[in-house]
Amino acid sequence: MEANGLRLQNFPELKNDTFLKAAWGEETDYTPVWCMRQAGRYLPEFRETRSTQDFFSTCRSPEACCELTLQPLRRFPLDAAIIFSDILVVPQALGMEVTMVPGKGPTFPEPLREERDLERLRDPATVASELDYVFQAITLTRQQLAGRVPLIGFAGAPWTLMTYMIEGGSSSTMAQAKRWLYQRPQASHKLLGMLTDALVPYLIGQVAAGAQALQLFESHAGHLGPELFGKFALPYIRDVAKRVKAGLQKEGLAPVPMIIFAKDGHFALEELAQAGYEVVGLDWTVAPKKARERVGKTVTLQGNLDPCALYASEEEIGRLVQHMLDEFGPQRYIANLGHGLYPDMDPEHVGAFVDAVHKHSRLLRQN
């Protein structure tokens, strides 16, 4: 691990730690807010920066990633930055070809079809060195942020990565990936284990490079029922948290809060709250009060405004935010959307969302 060399970096002192305090369950003066996909196509400056090279080339350019990560912070008083990258850099580092096809999304020309296809994959131990460009992007961005807000690193969870590697892209049913779970359970566990072995050093490397929090995206949780989720997703989600925390300690790195976001995984809220993460992200299909009752008081919740609410008027956004904050309550809470921002959203409305969270959460604390 290069962690020893990287740890000597002197990063600028953090000026706004509200997001980290909330993540650790400490009291905050207001509710911190960031948005999934805040560095995205809804920003004209993002489209301009991205227009010069293809998607994965952008991911491999630390300078481009840094610029894209910082763009939303120049516009909005967000309480955290999230590094610009993609969850599919991990399958890429394992030796799979992935291209981003405009209008279609990520595409794997040669997806995994048979158990023997697993032999094509590289040793998971080599993944972190393949992804050094992500670490460079994190270090550069952390320097450029100048302590303004914390920087979040992230990765896709094993099941979600497995779906892409088998389906060869996005799918409405995940039938091919689920076929593996039913027909080839052992091969499935083998693949999920390999992905976990790749993710652990990758996430530790992100922290060594300067990430101050980590989010694991289980974007395709909703395709699994409680039984399959408990067998093929949850054990690996738990394993990632446990091993990353142990690895940080072993490297002499300070612990960072970890966030699990399992989209449409509402059937496993209790289990996710006990999976070893400080923060549980919620999508918009979950009622905040019920979620809080189910997870107890020991974790922070993050979410969960319907992204499409940003199509409403700014006045209506204010009302919706007020209702959301009332439901979640003032502490142990990070405001966010229930999914990423969409490309056709109005940046002004994103600003209205961020401002409404800050304004109403301060008022909430006064009453």
Image: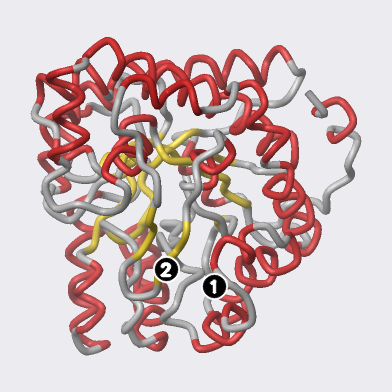
Q: Nearer the viewer, mark 2 or mark 1?
A: 1
Q: Nearer the viewer, residue 52 or 40?
A: 52
Could you say whether the residue bearing mark 1 is in a helix, strand or loop?
loop
- The colour scheme used here is secondary structure
Mark 1 closeness class: few <14, some 14–19, many ≥20 residues within 10 Å: some
Residue at 58 percent of width and 23 percent of height: 124
Image quadrant holding the N terminus, namely top right
Residue 163 located left or right of residue 258: left
Amino acid at the residue labelled 2: His
Could you say whether the residue bearing mark 2 is in a helix, strand or loop?
helix
Report which quarter residue 265 is drawn in: top left
The residue to which callout 1 is attached is: 77
Q: Which mark is residue 362?
A: none
Image quadrant holding the C terminus, namely bottom left
Residue 359 % position (x, y): 39, 72
Mark 2 or mark 1: name the one nearer the start of the chain.
1
Res 252 visible: yes
Examine the rendered structure and indicate whether residue 70 appears above or below residue 36.
below
Amino acid at the residue labelled 1: Pro
Mark 2 → mark 1, Cα distance in angstroms: 9 Å
Residue at 41 percent of width and 57 percent of height: 31
Residue 110 % position (x, y): 39, 44
Residue 113 % position (x, y): 29, 33
Mark 2 closeness class: few <14, some 14–19, many ≥20 residues within 10 Å: many
Examine the rendered structure and indicate whether residue 147 appears above or below residue 265.
below
Examine the rendered structure and indicate whether residue 150 appears above or below residue 178.
below
Label pair 2/1, CB-CB below 8 angstroms: yes
Residue at 73 percent of width and 24 percent of height: 253
The residue to which callout 2 is attached is: 358
Residue at 35 percent of width and 41 percent of height: 111
Report which quarter residue 58 is drawn in: bottom right
Q: Nearer the viewer, residue 159 or 283?
A: 159
